[in-house]
Amino acid sequence: MQFKQTLLILILCPVFAFSQSTYLTQGSKENILIERLEILGQKDSILNFSKTKPINRLQLVRGATSFKQLHPGIILSKTDEHNLQSLYVNNIEYLSDTQRAAIKSKRAIWRFYTTPANLYEVHVEDFDLVINPIIQFQYMKESDNDESLFLNSRGVGIRGRIANKIGFAASIVDNQERDPLYVQAWEDKFQSVPGAGYYKNFKGTGFDYFDARGYFTFNVTKYIDVAFGYDRNFIGSGYRSLFLSDFGNNTLFLKLNTRIWKINYQNLFMELQQTEPRGPDRLLRKKYAAFHHLDVNVTKKLNIGLFEGVMFGRSDHFEFGYLNPVIFYRSIEQQNGSFDNSVAGIDFKLNTLKKVQFYGQFLLDEFNLEQIKDNDGWWANKWGLQIGGKYINAFGIKNLDLQLEYNRVRPFTYSHRDSVANYTHYNQPLAHPLGANFSETIGILRYQPAPKWMLLAKAMYWKQGLDTGSRSFGSNIFLPNTSPPRQGDYGYEIVSGIESTTATLSFLLSYELKENLFIESSLTHRNFEVPANTSLSASTTIVAFGIRWNMHRRLFEF
């Protein structure tokens, strides 16, 4: 593929006028390059506003294109150059006709694959359209399990723009899967499939479900973007998020994003499903969430974020006060009688040494200063802490990236007095998949020795306090944090209850056969131990082989 980098940079700058954009899909490979460019560049504000995901495609291309202009002294590796070209190919609607001609496929199949990344595309005056297949087939074999495990996903995704003012994207994927035994146990316990909504049983121990997503976007002004639809969002710089993760099911959302000067301010309003047992077809009860996240580039290298959110539900009306995009939610929640579940938090991201990024989050659910001073484990001192670091081109080896992350969440964090206001959606956590009452350490090694090859190794270890009988020790955030599940007000520390430990080690080898078409193999070992009750302990090893096309990896890391 011929790609004229110099021509691209010279022509692209005038293209970015007052125009609309869609977002990267979940698990997009472009995220890896943006993370690396952000750390290498240290001070590019376009890239530093990356804590709110998914990332705007227009801002993505703009930031990547300006990178070499802003940092002429940084020489990218051969693999980074390849990934940069791939970024443009996969966001082609934001390139001019001349730029598209420079990356045109040498062997188009009739009107298909005129460029390397897209099955079918249209770029005419006032209209862009991109259509791609979505496919993932995976075969897995688990130790001590006679059944074969599998994932079978097929679908289609579209995206585009109308008159440079309205963006749209949609996808629908049909899935059948049979998951490892520990995942099946999770599904039986919580009556849900991770990352899915409504599902049916498939061939006994398997599941059948649709994953349908879609949204449209438009500009209110040059600096304010609006998106409305059904998809997932993520807030944070870490592998996990204590604010909002993409672990669970899609949500109906309205998002306002304001980006100006050194500030990025996002308002996110979501309609969610209350915690309910599975049963016959019926109208599920709704609840709502409203989040604010303010990003400020305090210095060229340091970004600070402020977060607040509230979970609420009403049987007879909507709480319109929470629609205010600038007010503190806690003040409204107090005016309403402190009935809802409000949270607040702060996060940071610091790029330093041109190879390292430090990041973190602190979530505050509820606390009492006097009780903290007494240090007697009052149940309602609820908070979560994340601290982490990323080290790119580690030890002088190009495209060897390391990440270390530590998460710690107190008992009963995210829970509430009822199922309406707990921090969940469709029987799944909205933030960290472990819920609460745990401490976790994650280590990640990612290495791209050549443009199309990637090795990914992950080690995870966590301790979590489990419930005893009918007594809740605060790990299960679906349970009410009132009596009788919670018995007593004091003596609750992290890992209170029955102490359990989980260690997971995984290796992935991936080869990109063509744009966004990956052939992959993986090995995962998971060891779960409960010293107080060894009958609950379990160890398993899973070997998997698969092919993935325009779809994120299906992971079960809990």
Image (spheres, rainbow, N blue to C red):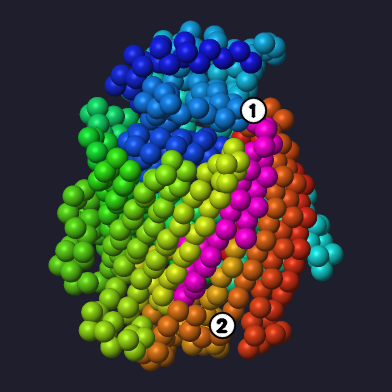
Q: Amino acid at mark 1?
A: Glu
- In the figure, residue 262 lies in which quadrant? top left
Looking at the image, is 55 positioned above or below residue 286? above
Q: Position of residue 275 (x, y in %)?
A: 45, 67
Residue 118 — which label? Answer: none
Q: Split into 4 quadrants, where in the image is the N terminus?
A: top right
- Is residue 513 shown to the viewer in this render? yes
The residue at 16%/64% (across/down) is: 331
> What residue would you read off at disc 1?
515
Segment colored magenta: 430-459
How crowded is the residue under tag 1: few (<14 C-alpha within 10 Å), some, or many (20+)?
A: some
Task: Locate residue 120 relative to residue 455 in the image: left or right.
Answer: left
* Secondary element type, mark 1: loop
Q: Along the line of sight, which residue is nearer the eye, 313 or 448?
A: 448
How crowded is the residue under tag 2: few (<14 C-alpha within 10 Å), some, or many (20+)?
A: some
Q: Split into 4 quadrants, where in the image is the C terminus?
A: bottom right
> What residue would you read off at disc 2?
499
